[in-house]
Amino acid sequence: QVQLVESGGGLVQAGGSLRLSCTASGSIFSMDNMGWYRQAPGKQRELVASITSGGTTTYADSVKGRFTISRDNAKNTVYLQMTSLKAEDTAVYYCKAWTTWRIDWGQGTQVTVSS
């Protein structure tokens, strides 16, 4: 059974930085594509950034130049470095792992940016 555990969320002032981590267990992490999604109150869950098993990255337009996704296969962990945070980045951030035959989600971590 795959488990994804997110950490690193919290309260930060606008303009500040946070780094989210998602550690996986129960899978061959190096084969997983990984992503960060977020869901703000009253809104749909949206893709923030993703990184494939081969290291190709994708970003939402709203975070390009501010957020960086990376992975450490030796630690079974994917990171989301967030800088220049804005109030509109406030949301629950979820980690997602997927292959062609399965999708798994973490439980989420709250990020709150005060303006």
Image: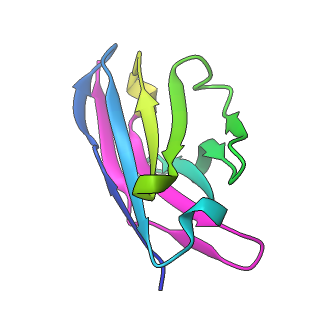
Which residue is farthest bottom? 1
What residue is drawn where x is 31% and y is 48%? Answer: 110
Whether 97 is among the magenta residues is yes
Q: In the image, 93: left or right of 19?
A: right
Q: Say left or right for 33 vs 27.
A: right
**Is 33 in front, or is 6?**
33
Residue stretch in magenta: 90-115
Q: Is residue 18 visible?
A: yes
Residue 29 placement (x, y as % from top left) = 55, 64
User: Is most of the magenta stretch helix, strand or loop?
Assistant: strand
Let me know if residue 43 appears in the view.
no
State the image coordinates of residue 97 (x, y, percent, origin top left): 58, 64
Q: What scheme was used to colour the molecule? A: rainbow
Residue at 43% x, 31% y: name it: 81
Q: Is residue 58 above or below residue 36?
A: above
Count of residue discs:
0
Q: Position of residue 94 (x, y in %)?
A: 46, 55
Which quadrant is home to the C terminus? top left
In the rendered image, the residue lying farthest to the front is 74
From the viewer's perspective, tell me whether residue 77 is left or right of residue 6: right
Magenta stretch encompasses residue 66: no
The correct choice, above or below, for 81 with respect to 4 in the image is: above
Residue at 58% x, 16% y: name it.
65
> What residue sits 57% from the left and 26% below the top?
63
Residue projecting furthest to the right: 100
5 shown above or below 50: below
Of residue 38 and residue 98, the one placed in the foreground of this image is 98
> At which x and y percent is residue 51?
65, 45
